[in-house]
Image: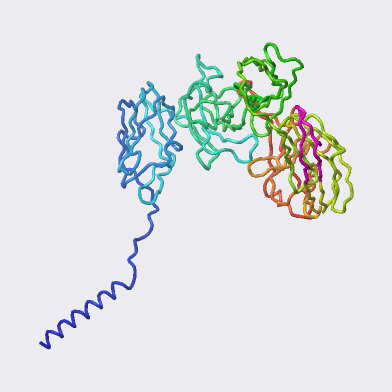
Amino acid sequence: MRSYFIRILSIAFFATIMVSCANRGTPSGGEKDVEPPVIEDEIPKNFSTNFKGDEIRIYFDEYVKIKDLRKQLIISPPMDTDPLIMPMSGASRYISIKIKDTLQANTTYAFNFGESIVDNNEDNPYPYYRYVFSTGDTIDSLSVRGYVEDALLDEPDTFVSVMLYEVDSTYTDSIVYKEKPRYITNTLDSVTTFSIDNIKAGTYKLIALKDKNGNYKFDQKDDKIGFKKGFITVPTDSVYPLTLFNEEVNFKAIKPKQDGASKIIFPYEGDYESMRIKVLGDTPEDYQTRIIKDPETDTLYYWYKPKFEIDTTFFIVSNKKYVDTFKHRFRKLDKDSLVMSVVSSRNLAFDKDFTIEGNIPLAKVDRSKINIIDKDSVTIDFEVEYDTIFNRYKLPIKKDEGQKYYIEMLPGTFMDFYGGINKDTLKLAALTKMKSEYGNIRVNLRNATLPLIVQLVDNNGKVLYERYAKDTPVVDFTDLEPKRYNLRVIFDSNGNGKYDTGNYLLGIQPERVSYAPKDKVDEVRASFDFVIDFTLLE
């Protein structure tokens, strides 16, 4: 009996020792896999000639999957019917490409997968896999290389399509709007250079496109375009720069609609400044109109009085050579009441004015009902300026630093187009900071050919401050908010005081823009004066 208990205790002790040893550490899963998948076979082989089939398979040494295929895959020449590429989801030991399009004879095709092929466990990408085959006897082996810039931004967009159109008897400049290119590549997500490979000798039009719709066709409204002037001949050793820009959209009027008792909205595309709206037919006696621009959208508000007694009329919308006619049916809607709202910030910068706007076109302001005093109750003189385009009144005053201004506008200060007035007293306050809370920048433009437009912009290219250098190459920016700015110069070649973009069909490149090196532009700090020497290259 005793030996039985000793045997049981020995087994229990041994089991305890084994459990203790097993729990001393957590088993490691091994080193993290950082190796990309490896191709084991390709059927048919990469760079095959006389391709006749309709399916390609690429085999790997492990399970793979496909990520962001629509964004990464570039097929050159583009196919009218997209191939079916598997696996669409999940993982597989091979990738299948099933061709659904009719292939062109004696043509080299290239499938550029970018970094869309990744292993199933760690998403390690197979780097820039490219599968090439020819339907003819030879693989075309020539290339066109270059780089992409942006006309206004310091860095160009990512995933820019760079395309070659073959110049033959059927070529016209409008081909970029209608047809897919002969060859195509992509700058992907971190590279601004490009190389269009496996092309044949010939004459081509070279185009860059930030293709928003992914259809390889130029949409003027949505896409940026860049082009090489004239044609290029392949083979070539040249490196081609392409500058992307937004074209000014061709004007187009869109069907108007009733938006208030006596207000019609007229949407449009393009430039509105020469846009004209006229009634076709009879109008009521003493008919008057006012047109106001929406500050955010491409819309004009057409206000009119008195009301039409008819149900329907026609409007003619014109803009230079553009003319269109729209039938308009009037609707009975509620009448608008005048509402005034403040546009300017409570913290009033020294280069800004107190600004107020109305929701109905304004016709008159009674200065005697406006009173502006400072924090010491001293009455402040002011001017009154009316912006007819955006329906705003500005009240310029002489601003002192560290002040608080109180603005009071009594009932009846403003009268609108229909005789309505503001019925409530408007009481507002605006503050100015101390000059020491701002910074200043002086820009010395070296090697400058005037005139130049000098701008301080944010990282998205939005203009925050602008000066026009017409007579001197020295430009001062004063009372700047402390922050980091980017400095750029626009070469105003036609001297019209504004940036002019390019036009593809007219063969016009955008005006040149140059950014100062980032290490030349220090962060603006309060109560500091900075001097930047910006040398402009020829």
Q: Position of residue 48 (x, y in %)?
A: 34, 31
Q: Which image quadrant for residue 46? A: top left
Q: Is residue 521 left or right of residue 114?
A: right
Residue 326 percent across, percent down from the top left: 61, 16
Q: Is residue 324 visible?
A: no
Residue range corresponding to the magenta coloring: 407-427
Residue closer to the observer: 45 or 153: 153
Residue sitting at x 42%, y 38%: 69
Q: How many numbered discs?
A: 0
Image height check: is 508 above or below 438?
above
Is residue 322 shown in magenta?
no
Pick whichever, 86 or 45, lies toward us. Answer: 86
Residue 136, relative to residue 524: is it above or below?
Answer: above
Do we see residue 196 in this rendering? Answer: yes
Front residue (pair 183, 526): 526
Q: Is residue 328 above or below residue 22?
A: above
- Is residue 110 shown left or right of residue 205? left
Q: What's the magenta bit mostly, secondary-structure-wise?
A: loop
| Quadrant position of residue 458 | top right
Most extreme residue toward the bottom is: 2
State the residue lying farthest toward the top: 281
Q: Is residue 414 magenta?
A: yes
Q: What is the residue that sits farthest to the left in this orientation?
A: 1
As displayed, is residue 457 above or below residue 205?
A: below
Q: Position of residue 445 (x, y in %)?
A: 77, 41
